[in-house]
Image: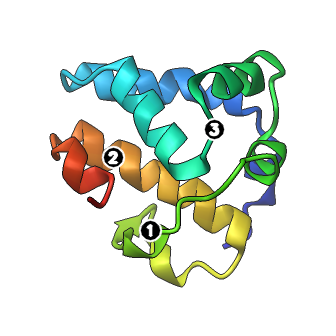
Amino acid sequence: MENTRVFKMSFASVYPHYIQKAEKKGRTKDEVDTIICWLTGYSQKSLQQQINLKADFETFFAEAPQINPHVSKITGVICGYRVEEIEDKLMQKIRYLDKLIDELAKGKAMEKILRK
């Protein structure tokens, strides 16, 4: 998966698309934020700071307080790749986030999305 230009994309530029995708399916911005915070360990305040700073994905994940220890439970296909088999750790984290937002948009219960 050679797509390193994604690493330099601003998280803030993609964030509205996550919200839009969720809201089109009747979900909320708060649910999107809950998923992002669950995955990364950011608080709501620190998430907003990353958005305000227009951090790229590489920085966003590098500065994440703690990637959730349950990420290994996130499995399946996103963009034609099995998330659990993606070798580049940064790309895998980005695809984990994509997968969780997809699950939200598909109507999955938050408890299942957050692997409780």
- Considering only vertical position in the picture, is 40 above or below 56? below
Image point (77%, 15%), residue name: 52
Local secondary structure at mark 1: loop
Q: Which residue is mark 1?
A: 70
Picture coordinates of residue 111, whole percent (x, y): 21, 49
Amino acid type at image mark 2: Asp
Label 3's element? loop
Sequence order check, earlier mark of 2 and 1: 1
Contact (CB < 8 A) between labels 3 and 1? Answer: no
Where in the figure is residue 5, as x and y percent of width and height?
A: 80, 51
Q: Nearer the viewer, mark 2 or mark 3?
A: 3
Q: Is residue 39 above or below residue 32?
A: below
Q: On the rendered image, what quadrant is the C terminus found in?
A: bottom left
Q: Are marks 2 and 1 in contact (CB under 8 Å)?
A: no
Q: Secondary structure at mark 2?
A: helix
Label 3 CA crowd tier, 10 Å (few <14, some 14–19, many 20+): many
Determine the residue positioned at 17% across, 46% down. 108
- Report whether 34 appears left or right of 93: left
The local crowd at label 1, few if under 14, some if 14 to 19, many if 20 or more residues have their Cα within 10 Å, is few
Label of residue 42 in the image: 3
* Three-letter residue code for mark 3: Tyr
Q: Which mark is residue 102?
A: 2
Q: Nearer the viewer, mark 2 or mark 1?
A: 1
Other residues around mark 2 within 10 Å, as few (<14) / some (14–19) / many (≥20): some
Vertical relation: 90 (above or below) 48: below
Q: Earlier in the sequence, mark 3 or mark 1?
A: 3
Q: CA distance from mark 2 to mark 3?
A: 20 Å
Lower position in the chain sequence, tag 2 or tag 3: 3
- From mark 2 to mark 1, how far is it between C-alphas? 18 Å
Labelled pair 2, 3 in contact (Cβ < 8 Å): no
**Residue displayed at 30% across by 61% down:** 115
Q: Nearer the viewer, residue 100 or 78?
A: 100
